[in-house]
Amino acid sequence: MRTCRLPVETITDTARASFRDGVLEVRILKSEAATQRVKKLNVE
């Protein structure tokens, strides 16, 4: 079994995971505080 640490700003109650064709997909929502701290960068 593997574990990974999640940022504090996640809503773990809404976490969903699926394993299909050898690919593990995990979906976890960000909290409001996390989405407000987004910083956009210009890529040249």
Image (spheres, rainbow, N blue to C red):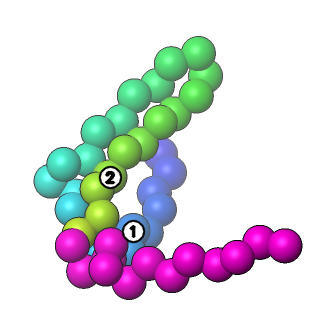
Nearest the viewer among 43 and 7 is 43
Disc 2 to disc 1: CB gap under 8 Å: yes
Outermost right residue:
44
**Magenta includes 43?**
yes
Examine the rendering and report whether any part of residue 4 can be seen. yes
Amino acid under disc 2 = Ile
Amino acid under disc 1 = Leu
Specify few, some or many for label 2: CA neighbours under 10 Å numbering under 14, 14-19, or 20 or more: some
Residue 15, how many percent across, how many down? 26, 47
Q: Is 27 situated above or below 4?
A: above
Specify few, some or many for label 1: CA neighbours under 10 Å numbering under 14, 14-19, or 20 or more: few
Residue 36, how many percent across, how many down? 31, 80
Label 1 SS = loop
The residue drawn where x is 46% and y is 25% is 19
Residue 40, how many percent across, how many down? 56, 77
Examine the rendering and report whether any part of residue 8 can be seen. no
The residue drawn where x is 23% and y is 69% is 31
Q: Is 30 situated above or below 20?
A: below
Write down the quadrant of residue 38 in the picture. Answer: bottom left
Cα separation between marks 2 and 1: 9 Å
Q: Main secondary structure of the magenta part?
A: loop
Residue that mark 1 sits on: 6
Residues drawn in magenta: 32-44
Outermost left residue:
13
Nearest the viewer among 13 and 39 is 39
Q: Which mark is residue 28?
A: 2
For marks 2 and 1, the one nearer the N-term is 1
**Magenta includes 6?**
no
Q: Is 6 situated above or below 18?
A: below
Write down the quadrant of residue 7 in the picture. Answer: bottom left
Label 2 SS = strand
